[in-house]
Image (cartoon, grey):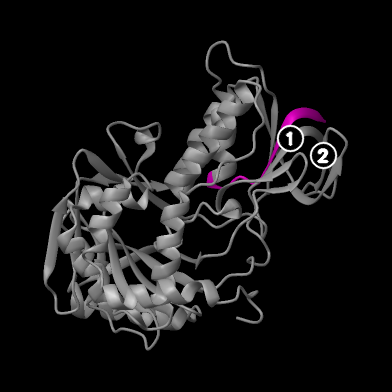
Amino acid sequence: MESDVAIVGAGAAGLSLALRLARPPEAAHQVTAVLLAAPPGPFRAPRRTWCYWETGPGPYDEVLSASWRRLRVRSHDGRAVDRGIAPLRYKMLSSAAFEELTGRALAGSPHVRTVEAVVERIEPLPGGALVHARRADGGQVRVRARWVFDSRPPRVLPPARTTLLQHFRGWFVRARRPVFDTAAVELMDFRTPQPAHGLSFGYVLPTGPCEALVEYTEFSRRPLGQGAYDRALGEYTGRVLRIGDHEVTAYEQGVIPMTDAVFPRRSAASVFRIGAAAGAIRPATGYAFGAVGRQTAAVAAALHTGRHPLPPCPHPARSLLMDAVLLHALDRGRIDGPAFFTRLFTRVPAGRLLRFLDGRTSLAEDLSMGLHVPVPAMLRSALGLPFVPRRGPDTS
């Protein structure tokens, strides 16, 4: 097959870019694309839940699981800090719903074709690249494209000064009585046993009075075994939330790197990385879906206007520097993680905090937020960070 664009991988970034190319604006350059999606099996990413925030209606509102205008953080002693985020809305989207929405759009579009195949290698060529893939039945697929956008996560993380993991397991819970507050998300509930290194918290996304996604999350250097997560979730739903009799209808589990590594956005003249593979994950929080949308929108706009489609850096340099300092301080144990995030959420308006996480605050606003952090610890990390060598994951 020949195409202007080949998109490798059908996760958030691959689907987002395909969806934008399937719906070109009027008077846009005509761009054809092939989306190479792994067939069901070990190479397909497990289904998961994405959360993000935006002002007003959004392009995926019709398939949202739920949305909220209030966020809540609870300190280790149970003190609740409840904040409204208007005009923003915090939104919950399942990957299955996003795949279905994108599938309908692609089925009716003459611009994007979907092929179920596992990509084995990408061969750079003069003026483009050749993508080699294999179908589930063993048949070979080759796609020659002017531009290739690879959304597959890297096999090995780039060298970094600090790398923590945000690892979690979630239960989709149905209680026998109304126990969940559907008006607010429990964003960080620190009434969980804290690990010796890093921090932990509960995360509750209520989709009804009796239904919610309840997650146990840690920021630390290594993930846990499934039994440890389930024990933590059993303790959290029983002793802390006291939801009583309930059933667990589904599970989700994942690991998100929180790192100050520099992710290359280009691997050959016509081959680019997008999404988490291109650094879309916000280092200090693990959020990525909003940044993925902004990055793929910029790529699609460049393609539709005939410009060079190098994916932009998903986060401003100033935000990445602040995140690097925070990760270093947290990893070295210089700050109390639960106290740090509780204080920040208590003293900074929630809307501004979310805009900060999107990299949309001004320098003055960033400096004002600095007044609410432990200055000596953060300053010590900031001054020492330039002297910390970047190491690969095997030697860190």
* Residue bounds of the magenta highlight: 1-12
Find out whether residue 361 is within the magenta segment. Answer: no
Q: Amino acid at mark 1?
A: Trp
* Residue at numbered disc 1: 147
Query: Are the two marked residues, 1 and 2, in contact with CB atoms closer than 8 angstroms?
Result: yes
Density class for disc 1 (Cα within 10 Å; few <14, some 14-19, many ≥20) is many
* Residue at numbered disc 2: 129
Q: Secondary structure at mark 2?
A: strand
Q: Position of residue 180 (x, y in %)?
A: 17, 59
Observer-nearest of 52 and 235: 52
The residue that appears at 36% across and 47% down in the rendered structure is: 52
Is tag 1's residue or tag 2's residue first in the polypeptide sequence? 2
Observer-nearest of 82 and 34: 82
Q: Secondary structure at mark 1?
A: strand
The residue that appears at 40% across and 35% down in the rendered structure is: 60
Observer-nearest of 387 and 305: 387
Q: How many marks?
A: 2
Whether residue 178 is visible, yes or no, is no
Q: Quadrant of residue 261?
A: bottom right
Whether residue 8 is visible, yes or no, is yes
Left or right position of 245 against 128 = left
The residue that appears at 39% across and 46% down in the rendered structure is: 93
The residue that appears at 40% across and 31% down in the rendered structure is: 59
